Image: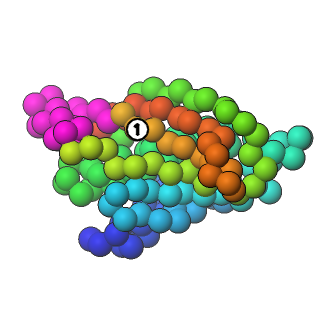
Amino acid sequence: MNSEQARQALQAFVTQHVPLVAAAGIEVDHYDAQSLVLSAPLDKNINDKGTAFGGSLYNLCVVTGWGLTWLLSQELQLAGEIVVAKGEIEYLRPLRGRLIATVARPEQDALCHFKAGYARRGKAVLQQTVTIPDETGTPCVRFQGKYALVAEP
């Protein structure tokens, strides 16, 4: 499947299976096998201060990292359940515009380790960093996530 088909498949999957995606207006904006970009409108994710709600920022980061893990597992033909094993977020500054989260494809060594772990133990783990900048490109959020792919019995 090409990058556009993969983007559309991810959008369909998360919209169908994660009700929060629709409620928050999350869109899969871009995927090119090197990075994944998801976004959400401020008006559906706003707090009482007129800035992005912290929980919405966290959720967008989690879904973005999960989405890349899902796309990579499809690409590597590894079947299983993806779970978030750990997530840590740093709120660096308020965000007053559209929430746009980006995650880069892991290095090839990490992907080899991911695939080898799945082959040996039926479980694979990926560490990912998701960022959300403001309109000037200054980081507002930095999220570190650990995602596990567990083979179905």
Where 112 falls versus 99 (above or below)?
above
Is 30 a magenta residue?
no
Would residue 112 be seen by someone viewing this image from the given angle? Answer: yes
Residue drawn at the location 29% of the way across and 32% of the way down = 125
Query: Was residue 114 drawn as part of the magenta stretch in this picture?
Result: yes
- Position of residue 26 in the picture relative to residue 63 (left or right): right
User: Would residue 34 appear left or right of 30 to someone viewing this image?
Assistant: left
**Residue at position x 36%, y 40% from top?**
82
Q: Which image quarter holds the N terminus?
A: bottom left
Label 1 residue SS: strand
Q: Residue 45, position in %: x, y?
A: 75, 49
Quarter of the image for residue 128 reads top left
Establish if 73 lies above or below 149. below
Image quarter for residue 151? top left
Q: For the point 19% across and 54% down, which residue is it?
A: 77
Write down the residue under mark 1. Answer: 128
Magenta span: 109-126
User: Horizontal and vertical percent for residue 144?
Assistant: 48, 32
Main structural element of the magenta stretch: helix, strand or loop?
helix
Residue 96 % position (x, y): 78, 50
In the rendered image, the quadrant that contains the C terminus is top left
Q: Which of 140/87 is in front?
A: 140
Q: Nearer the viewer, residue 20 or 64?
A: 64
Residue flagged by tag 1: what amino acid is it? Gln
Q: Residue at x 34, y 50 (%)?
A: 105
Q: Quadrant of residue 146?
A: top left
Instruction: Categorize mark 1 by other alpha carbons within 10 Å: few (<14), some (14-19), many (20+).
Output: many
State the image coordinates of residue 27 (x, y, percent, origin top left). Answer: 57, 62
As rendered, which of 12 and 141 lies closer to the eye? 141
Position above or below: 87 against 31: above
The colour scheme used here is: rainbow
